[in-house]
Amino acid sequence: MLTFVANDAEDETMRLRLETVSWLAQSERYSKFCSAPHARHKSNRQRLSIWKEDSDGTSSREAHHTGYASLQPSQYRFTWGDYAALSYVWGPEAPTETIIVNDTPVEVRQNLASALKSIAKDRRFEGDLRLWVDALCINQEDKAERGQQVAKMKDIYNMAWNVISWIGDEAEESPKAFHLLRVLSEHRDHRKATTLIEELERNPERLGAGCWLALQNLVNRPYWSRLWIIQEVVMGCVAVTIRCGDKTISWPIFLQGIEALHRQFWIVKDQLINHDWRQQGHRNYRTISVRSLHLLFKDLKPLSDSQTGHSRNWASLSRLIDISASCKSADPRDKVYGMLAMMDPAITERINPDYLIQPKDVFTNVAIAAFETYGNLEFLRECNMWGGEGGPTWAPDWTWPLRNRDGRFRQGAYQASRSRACNIRIDRDNLRLRCQAILVDTLDGIGGRRATRFKYVPRSVIQADSSASIYGGIEATKQALVHALAGDSSWTAREDAEARMSILCLPSTFEKGLTQFRKYGWHNAVKNEGYYYCWEKWRHANRDLCVGGQKLDDYFEPAIPCGMTEQNCWQAKGEFERMTSWRRFATTSKSYIGWVPEFVGGKDQLQVRQGDVVAVILGCTTPILLRKCGDYFKVIGEAYFIGLMAGEAIGMLEQGQYKTVEINLI
């Protein structure tokens, strides 16, 4: 642990003292507290929260808003004092700055030097309150020590009295962003938010000129794109203090502001940010980046809640692999190791952080641990054959960059293999996985593919050879199409089946629909031009694909009928956008309608193609698309086909229409 050493008046060099301390050296009072019934079986973070509540000086309004609580010696948990941990982005290797640690010059990167200088101003760490900093407290050149310390990272941040999240020096009006977040945190209630939105529409600078753009710039700082940061702030949870220059805000208030932004101010935020953008002299409309906003609200908030006892204190592998893929790390192995603190302990006990093995072996070990721990093959849903590390296709590659949490199939929504148990065998030497599957069908017609997320490749539709429909006539096929577009498990058991049909009445372009939206008083639809492009582009790219004997475009209505509700249309459209994210529309030789994985921007030979196999694999809740390679199969990814998602293939298996076969995945 580190403490700051006071300098002579003329000496500006940063001086620190590094000492080894022990968590076992608990104070007598804290030791008795940990043994008490109300604290004994709690997690480190929950136990610390109780300890803080029982102590004086931690519940002030200032501490709640800034994240800093006064810490008295009587509150120290250890005989040597207590500690905080620093969370920060390492930044570029150069330039560096020299600091003195235990009378020895040490070169540190600029971002760490800036953080230490700012923290030193508080003079909090000159006595028995210590600071833990990974770059200085771990020998980064020793891979064995690094692996040992990685295994302890969860406890280091989880037990810290305070985690200081250094997001950089004050810049781009960052204090205004902190002010805005505090205001938003007080407007999570819909009624309060509605009143404020009305005021903002009349006066975009109601909360201060430039504050919305300042918030956009704050959440898009590099800090939020680094993988290890996720673990550090989640483990710190309610004890995290966000620090930018000399300004601070508590993690709970920060997240409450982000939550209000998502739930209440999401639509209006774009026009407010662009108002600030134009006021700074820029003429062009600015594209709003929401990656970090989604990360904070959809991932970090639930993960933080899990550490305070609001839910189980680990996340699913599906969520963690999404987060990991969207963040940057210098070492591919850290895609897994940086998530260990948030994994199911039953998985982590099988994984030993080892920087001497190849990344593909790390990923394979995680897959095997998941299959053996849970006794199913659900983790196959995360697989594809496009990973860059060269592992088996049945082991998800955590570096695959095109994962998209918004397009993920809902967990628990489907039961393609019902409760059929899987019987798997893994050849660890040859990296083959043997399992049982129903080989249902092969791909036939495939919709347009994308060169980028929002641009389709011209003439990329692969026309179907079959013109039949497994669902029946045109009307039955139309109903199946509707529920396939929305990703329903079945179209026969939904009470809102008629409401779902409204998606066929959405105009093919916003321009065509605008007059109708105004006619029927669809106020939200009128404002949502920026969120209509996915529908427009998909309709145009796939209009000529043959589905059940006629063009896809022929299933849609020319106008919105009187009496149709905006809520029904927009709900169905939202489900459609989730389904089409990183997927292509497709049909099979038997004319099942559904969706298959898409390699956006990939080469032609790596795309899905006619003849790829649709399989229901026992132990996996969604169909899996496979490619036959001699006597083996490669995993392309999870698929969706209406009529297979609720266990219908298992029903046909029991009736003798299908049979299971053993297959080898490589």
Image (cartoon, grey):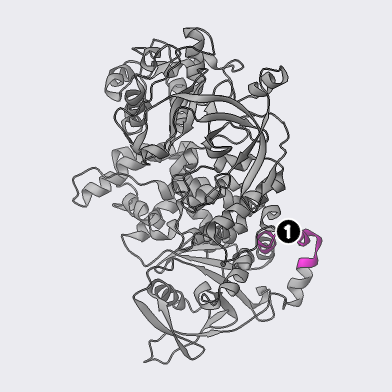
Image location of residue 629, percent across then percent down: 53, 38
Local packing at callout 1 (Cα closer than 10 Å; few below 14, some 14-19, many 20+) is some
For residue 463, above or below residue 297: above
Where residue 448 sits, quadrant-wise, is top left
Q: Is residue 42 magenta?
A: yes
Pointer 1: what residue?
42
Q: Amino acid at mark 1?
A: Lys
The part of the chain drawn in magenta is 34-48
> Which element type, helix, strand or loop, lies under badge 1?
loop
| In front of the other: 58 or 414 | 414
Residue 79 vs residue 510: left or right? right
Image location of residue 352, percent across then percent down: 65, 63
| Residue 65 seen in render | no
Residue 69 vs residue 460: left or right? right
Q: Is residue 452 magenta?
A: no
Q: At x 69% / y 57%, what residue is drawn?
A: 350
| Residue 309 seen in render | yes
Image location of residue 98, percent across then percent down: 40, 83
Q: At x 51% / y 78%, what residue is drawn?
A: 136
Image location of residue 336, percent across then percent down: 56, 57
Q: Quadrant of the C terminus?
A: top right
